């Protein structure tokens, strides 16, 4: 039986309801409706109730873009939410995302518990830096790697707005950086990876996760110190839990595999992806 790992809501985030391929979420004082393929079941609340609650709805136009529709006036000021005293800026992007993946809160809690001052953390595909900021807040040394400059700028803002400093920022393809670190002989206590299903490197080279994942896991195993931890999320249906297990087992003394889920306030359950926690 594959364990279900549930990520809880917190004060500033709530998964209110889900269904008919959409999800209703509260981010601070702002409520959004966004597409969600895994919400293939009927919602608990009516469409009318959703529209009455929501400020914004993302209307999908293609697999890579869409537009945000304003349903009611937004609260004034910057759109931010907080987690364990840390601050994260949210923005409407061209493809449904707002700058945070709240289902990963279970990972942030583990990062906070695992790291100690002076330990070294590597965050690959680091996006807007939630895991990096959580890691830095423990007093650990954090290296943040992403191939998109705008996301690094966003992550820096989150760090500074959380009252932190001195994260090491790397604008580079994650696998290339990891391979360079291998050659340099650098090692880490914790590596976090949240790779997208596909991506474009800093030199516009395209790649698919199913072609890279085995190499990423192997590289992470080399970069981890003894008793180090790898945390990996995958969201693409092209990669199975069995494949992740097959890639990880040769390199780690202990692996924990699970499915990442959240429960809605209305009692529905929503599947997000697969989670690997592997100990060197």
Image: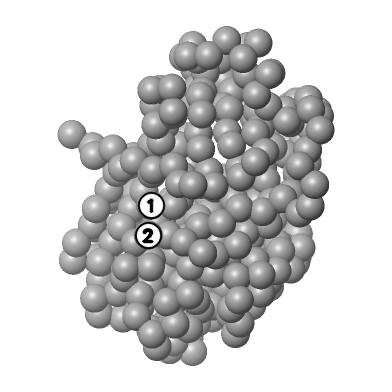
Q: Quadrant of residue 240?
A: top left
Left or right for 213, reference 150 = left
Toward the viewer: 257 or 106? 106
Toward the viewer: 131 or 216? 131
Image point 63% across, 19% down: which residue?
50
Image point 44% across, 29% down: which residue?
264
Left or right for 266, reference 198 = left
Image point 18% across, 66% down: which residue?
253
Image point 57% across, 10% down: which residue?
46
Q: Where does residue 249 sit, x and y in percent of width and height?
A: 24, 58
Q: Where does residue 11 sit, x and y in percent of width and height?
A: 49, 47
Q: Residues within 10 Å of mark 1 (few under 14, many from 20)?
A: some
Q: Quadrant of residue 197?
A: top right
**Residue beneath disc 2:** 109
Toward the viewer: 187 or 35? 35
Whether residue 126 is visible here, answered yes or no, is no
Q: Residues within 10 Å of mark 2 (few under 14, many from 20)?
A: some
The quarter of the picture where the N terminus appears is: top left
Q: Is residue 21 above or below residue 118?
A: above
Q: Quadrant of residue 223?
A: bottom left
Q: Is residue 248 above or below residue 159?
A: above
Q: Where does residue 6 sit, x and y in percent of width and height?
A: 34, 41
SS under mark 2:
helix
Q: Where does residue 36 sit, x and y in percent of width and height?
A: 57, 28
Q: Are marks 1 and 2 in contact (CB under 8 Å)?
A: yes
SS under mark 1:
helix
Q: Which mark is drawn over residue 106?
A: 1
């Amino acid at each position: 039986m594959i364990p279900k790992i549930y990520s809880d809501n917190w004060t500033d985030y709530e998964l209110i309801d889900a269904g008919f391929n959409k999800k209703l979420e509260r981010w601070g004082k702002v409520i959004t409706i966004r597409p969600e393929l895994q919400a293939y079941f009927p919602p608990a609340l009516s469409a009318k109730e959703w529209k009455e609650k929501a400020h914004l709805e993302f209307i999908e136009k293609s697999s890579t873009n869409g537009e945000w529709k304003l349903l009611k006036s937004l609260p004034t000021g910057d759109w931010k939410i907080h987690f364990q005293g840390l601050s994260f800026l949210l923005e409407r992007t061209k493809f449904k995302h707002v700058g945070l993946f709240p289902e990963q809160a279970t990972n942030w809690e583990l990062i906070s518990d695992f790291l100690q001052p002076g330990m070294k953390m590597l965050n690959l595909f680091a996006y807007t830096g939630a895991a990096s900021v959580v890691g830095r807040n423990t007093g650990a040394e954090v290296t943040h790697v992403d191939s998109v400059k705008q996301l690094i700028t966003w992550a820096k803002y989150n760090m500074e707005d959380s009252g932190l400093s001195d994260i090491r920022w790397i604008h580079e393809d994650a696998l290339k950086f990891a391979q360079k670190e291998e050659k340099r002989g650098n090692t880490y206590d914790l590596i976090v990876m949240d790779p997208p299903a596909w991506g474009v490197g800093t030199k516009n080279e395209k790649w698919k996760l199913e072609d890279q994942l085995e190499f990423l896991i192997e590289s992470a195993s080399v970069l981890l110190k003894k008793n180090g931890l790898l945390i990996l999320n995958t969201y693409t249906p092209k990669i199975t839990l069995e494949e992740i297990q097959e890639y990880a087992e040769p390199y780690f003394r202990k692996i924990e595999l699970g499915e990442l889920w959240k429960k809605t306030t209305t009692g529905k359950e929503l599947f997000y992806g697969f989670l690997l926690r592997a100990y060197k």
